[in-house]
Amino acid sequence: MAQMTRIQRFSWGTADNAQVLIVHFGSKSTPMIAQQLRQIGLRSRVIDAADLSAVTATEYCPKLVILSGGDDSVFNDNAPTIADRDLATFMQHGVVLGICYGAQLLATKLGGKVATAATPEFGAVQVQVTAPFGTYTGGTAVMNHNDEIVALPAGWRVFASTAHCQHALVGADKVYAVLFHPEVDHTEHGDTLLAHLAFTLAGCEPDYTYDLAAYVDQCVRWLCHVVPAGDVELGLSGGVDSAVAFALAQRAYGTRLHATFVDTGFMREGEL
């Protein structure tokens, strides 16, 4: 049997081994969490809460796990949840952040208390920072909750509050909870909050860029690292994917590259 070789990966994250895992509890703004992460330079992986056991059964250990919001209440019998062992695994290997419903779920799981809010908050509210949280300065934020955290788990502290919600941003060490939505556009400095969690607290490294030139340079460096010497053979079908691969390989390998066009029969007439 031929010896198995280790699969070479880019230095930045891929869908399977992204540094950030987003656990989806039904929030419509979950895609916005992934988008905000991309804006600050991080790729993420999104998985439904119901499929979480498949992730924790692997060797995949994200540095930051984000529990999304959702329309449910932690009081409901069939509300989505996270197993204690899975939460412990994530906290052992990285940092966990809960947003809205995810924040309430974290608080109850770790010994805190959630209750119906005396004054539910919806829409834009003003967040006041009460203790330093990186360079996050508060300001306008979007709330959408009927329940709130009324008693903190042991060791947690308050970082930010609103006029009607004392525990708007709380946490300690490996776990943090934010009742507002830092991922939406109308929340001021939400990117700063997430960046502090990801880079300072969780130790993530930037692995995503919108800068095309920088991305191409990184690809070329990676290709040179994977095959530092010798000839390189490449099959070229003429499609977009293979054409881009050829262009990048040509920059990396120069005359070492030998490309062969493979006529698949799917090219447009006269296009070669």
Image (spheres, grey):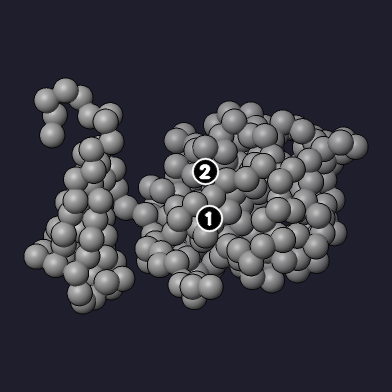
- Locate residue 192, reporting x and y percent: 44, 54
Image disc number at residue 261: none
The residue sitting at 37% across, 54% down in the picture is 208
The residue sitting at 64% across, 59% down in the picture is 96
Residue 5, relative to residue 187: is it above or below? below
Q: Which residue is mark 1?
A: 16
Query: Does the CB distance between marks 1 and 2 fall below 8 Å?
Result: no
Helix, strand or loop at label 2? It is: helix
Regarding residue 171, the answer to whether it shows in the image is no
Q: Earlier in the sequence, mark 1 or mark 2?
A: 1
The residue sitting at 52% across, 60% down in the picture is 17
- 134 lies left or right of 120: left
* Residue at the far left in the pictured view: 255
- Locate residue 224, reporting x and y percent: 23, 70
Q: Which residue is mark 2?
A: 33
Q: Quadrant of the C terminus?
A: top left
- Disc number lying in front (1 or 2): 1
Q: Residues within 10 Å of mark 1 (few under 14, many from 20)?
A: few
Amino acid type shown at disc 2:
Ile
- Locate residue 113, reporting x and y percent: 84, 51
CA separation in Å, label 1 and label 2: 18 Å
* Residue at the far right in the pictured view: 77
Amino acid type shown at disc 1:
Asp
* Residue at the far top in the pictured view: 269
- Locate residue 56, reporting x and y percent: 70, 59
The residue sitting at 28% across, 36% down in the picture is 264
